[in-house]
Image (tube, rainbow, N blue to C red):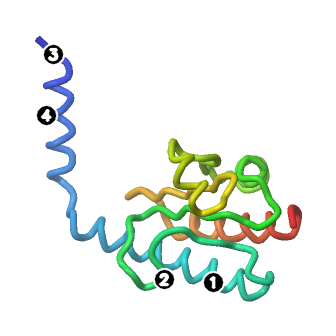
Amino acid sequence: PPITQAVGLGAALEWLGNHDPQGIRNHLNSLTEQIMAGMAQLNSRHDSRIRILGPSRGERRLPLISFSIGGAHPHDICQIMNDRHGVALRGGHHCAEPLHAIFDLDGTTRASLGMFNRQEDVDALLNGIEDCLNILT
């Protein structure tokens, strides 16, 4: 029997029980909204080069943002973000190539937030995206 897995699940549930789910949700919603607002500001300064997939700013969304930058490959964005800004992102089709084809995209870059992300992480992400806009477009 999967005893180790059962013990691990119990420990994980105990750990989660020590945290406030609504507080985590509020924290992630706040960070997500800050990123959306920051990307909107970057878009206004950079000829709307950023395309965000999913719900618009102010609408309910998960704490992740998939985006593309016109003229820039997602892997190049991820490389610059990691090397110059210490920000880990995912780039590519994210196991959803048919969906990317519908949106006429060669891939996207995805930023995913977790409960341990902070304001400094949001700032690094937005600074890095502006850097990518300046370098890659």
Q: Where does residue 68 sit, x and y in percent of width and height?
A: 67, 63
Query: Is 29 left, or right, of 102 in this rendering?
Result: left
The reply to whether the C-beta atoms of the residues labelled 1 and 3 are less than 8 Å apart is no
Q: Helix, strand, or loop for circle 2?
A: loop
**Which residue has dot 1 on it?**
40
Q: Where does residue 100 sit, x and y in percent of width and height?
A: 58, 55
**Which residue has dot 4 on it?**
10
Label 3, residues with CA under 10 Å away: few <14, some 14-19, many ≥20? few
- The count of marks equals 4
How far, Cα to Cα, is label 1 from label 4?
42 Å
The reply to whether the C-beta atoms of the residues labelled 3 and 4 are less than 8 Å apart is no
Image quarter where the C terminus lies is bottom right
Which quarter of the figure has residue 102?
bottom right
**Which residue has dot 2 on it?**
57
Comparing labels 3 and 4, the label whose residue is closer to the camera: 3
Label 1, residues with CA under 10 Å away: few <14, some 14-19, many ≥20? some
Comes first in the chain, label 1 or label 4: 4
Q: Helix, strand, or loop for circle 1?
A: helix
How far, Cα to Cα, is label 2 from label 4?
37 Å
Comparing labels 1 and 3, the label whose residue is closer to the camera: 1
Query: Is 21 left, or right, of 135 in this rendering?
Result: left
How far, Cα to Cα, is label 3 from label 4?
12 Å
**Which residue has dot 3 on it?**
2
In the image, is residue 108 above or below residue 57?
Answer: above
Comes first in the chain, label 2 or label 3: 3
Q: Nearer the viewer, residue 121 or 78?
A: 78
Q: Where does residue 76 sit, x and y in percent of width and height?
A: 78, 50
Comes first in the chain, label 3 or label 4: 3
The reply to whether the C-beta atoms of the residues labelled 2 and 3 are less than 8 Å apart is no
Label 2, residues with CA under 10 Å away: few <14, some 14-19, many ≥20? some
How far, Cα to Cα, is label 1 from label 3?
48 Å
